[in-house]
Image: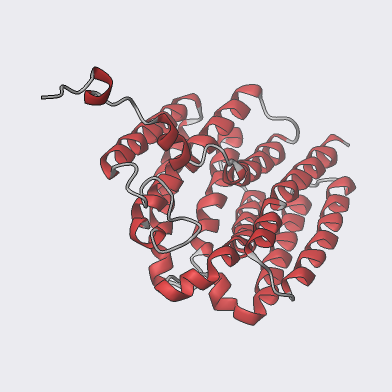
Amino acid sequence: MQVPSPIQATPGIPWSSYARLIRLPSQTGTYLLLLPTLWALVLAAQGFPSPSLLAVFVAGSFLMRSAGVILNDLADQSFDREVLRTKTRPLASGELPRRQAFVLLAVLLLLAAGLLWLLDPIVAWFSPIAVLLAALYPFCKRWIHIPQAVLGLAFGWGTIMAWAAVRGQLDAPVWCLFGATAAWAVAYDTIYALQDRDDDLRIGVKSSALFFGPFIHVGVGTALCLMLLLLSAAGWLAHIKWPYYAALSGLALFFIFQIGQLRQPINPSQAFRMFKAHVWVGVAVLAGLLAGVSL
């Protein structure tokens, strides 16, 4: 009888599977979660935030985004098997057992909770809402036609926590940032959902890309207009100077260009490129804020 080798009998930790489970090779989602928190930190501090706060929110964004995609894959495992783009994900393909995904999820959430000890105690009171929204979002595509709105609330909640970490309270401008982030997420995630529109229609998953249909340019354009209006209101309430509004004006031109693209048929690779470009939208807002508060 052949005796298994020690390596065969005791398989190692599946690091590669874990890395793909949390989308480690692609951090676009982390940037899109992080950037609005940086807007809030800069606006609340009226300048560069402290290095310690910056480090906490960079780490927290990575941990919570990683936890969020695990929650998404656990909820959507059966759906992901039916979608060309997602059927090779570790859980959908059966490469990684659900038990191991839950263990990694617990580790990530514990690490994120540990960061709260480094922040103003008020931030800890807001943190359960962040986890609740992250857990709720994957199921919303079964219930509502624009689940991206819940994703927007989840991503926008980081602005609330960042503002509270600086000020120890919530002020009017942060609610504008929160709303702007939520509207922005509806826009870019609708573009992202174009990649799976045919598969989502076939398997019965709801998305704003399906809901808007031939009027997707109107839906995305409305969300982006709302984003710009709320960002302008946040700047006005915080008395930000003209470079910030110049940055928003430049973004308005870019948004007009993207809306024009959406009036034509978009293939999945085009949709993904358009989605990734929104990282630079967030960078432009951040640059405008830094310039506007420094004058």
Q: Which is nearer the eye, 95 or 30?
A: 95
* Horizontal arrangement in the rendering, residue 172 relative to residue 206 (left or right): right
Identify the residue at the far front of this view. Answer: 1
Q: Using the image as rendered, state which of residue 4 and residue 288 is in the foreground.
A: 4
Q: Quadrant of the N terminus?
A: top left
* 99 horizontally vs 258: left or right: left
Q: How many marks?
A: 0
Q: Is residue 71 above or below residue 16?
A: below
- Identify which residue is drawn at 78% across, 53% down: 236
Q: Position of residue 150 (x, y in %)?
A: 49, 60
User: Can you give x and y, in whole percent of width and height, for residue 264 in the image?
Assistant: 74, 75
Left or right: 238 with respect to 103? right
Q: For the view shown, which residue lies furthest in the left direction?
A: 1
Name the spot of residue 152 as percent of width and height, x first: 55, 57
Q: Is residue 148 above or below residue 54?
A: below
Q: Residue 180: horizontal and vertical position, in percent?
A: 65, 57
Query: Which residue corresponds to the image point at 46% horizontal and 55% vertical from the top-left?
Result: 86
* Residue at the far bottom in the pictured view: 214
Residue 44 falls in image quadrant: top right
Residue sitting nearer the eye, 99 or 132? 99
User: Looking at the figure, which quarter contains the C terminus?
Assistant: top right
Q: Is residue 190 left or right of residue 48?
A: left
Q: Residue at x 65, y 75 (%)?
A: 216
Classify 226 as above or below 280.
below
For the rendered model, the colour scheme is secondary structure
Q: Quadrant of residue 83?
A: bottom left
Q: Nearer the viewer, residue 78 or 208?
A: 78
Which residue appears at 58% of the width and 42% of the height?
A: 26
